[in-house]
Image: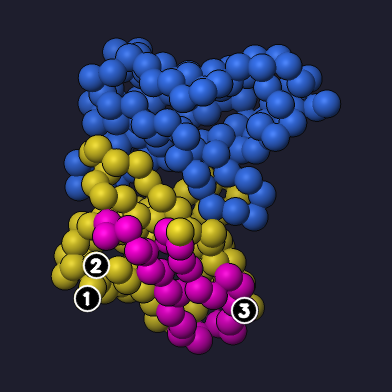
Chain colours: A blue, B yellow
Amino acid sequence: KQEVTQIPAALSVPEGENLVLNCSFTDSAIYNLQWFRQDPGKGLTSLLLIQSSQREQTSGRLNASLDKSSGRSTLYIAASQPGDSATYLCAVLTDSWGKLQFGAGTQVVVTP
Amino acid sequence: NAGVTQTPKFQVLKTGQSMTLQCAQDMNHEYMSWYRQDPGMGLRLIHYSVGAGITDQGEVPNGYNVSRSTTEDFPLRLLSAAPSQTSVYFCASSRGLDTGELFFGEGSRLTVL
């Protein structure tokens, strides 16, 4: 069974620092990997989707890398801002019919 | 831009009662799903559907029923509520998970006493 792990569970950084969030998975046979953001009391918002054939995906200050062979993905957020404070979750698709496996998330606090 | 709409946002039930959580999307997505989110457990898939008339079980389907009579709607039914079903429930949709991102509703917080 696919296991998805996100370490650390919580992270606090001062404003302006770059954020590095990690996601690891046990089965490299994935279709794609998504990174999500969740604000308190809200639903999840998709940030980036990386197909299994891609090595990275970028959107503005966000960059996500994927290394299938080692079972890892990293989300980089450049020049963090207090508005980046949220919980970030990764999810892998190992079944083309639609079973996403989520990590438990990393709670990020960016202090002014 | 409605996206994925869930109702109700909050609900309190007594053990043994039944209820339906509603989910509707206006993006013409074929894929719809229900998750529950519990502290320390992350998101777990309850049921999903890849089109009208097609549903399948996820990781934690017991105690829940679904149906998909239209592309837009995917209701989740709790047959006989139990305290273990106290959770936050999320509905999500996608044009297809192999190529498209997943869009979530705002969630429905359910408490079973």
The CA distance from mark 1 to mark 2 is 7 Å
| Label 2 sits on residue | B71
Q: Residue A96: horizontal and vertical position, in percent?
A: 19, 41
Amino acid type, label 2 = Thr
Let me know if residue B1 appears in the view: yes
Amino acid type, label 1 = Ser
Q: Relative to B96, say whether A17 is above or below.
A: above
Residue B15 covered by magenta stretch: yes
In the displayed orientation, state which residue is furthest to the bottom.
Answer: B17
In the displayed orientation, state which residue is furthest to the front.
Answer: B1
Disc 1, SS = loop
Question: Quick check: do tags 1 and 3 share a chain?
Answer: yes
User: What count of labels does the image hold?
Assistant: 3
Q: Chain of mark 3?
A: B
Q: Relative to A43, say whether A57 is above or below.
A: above
Q: CB of mark 3 within 8 Å of CB of mark 2?
A: no
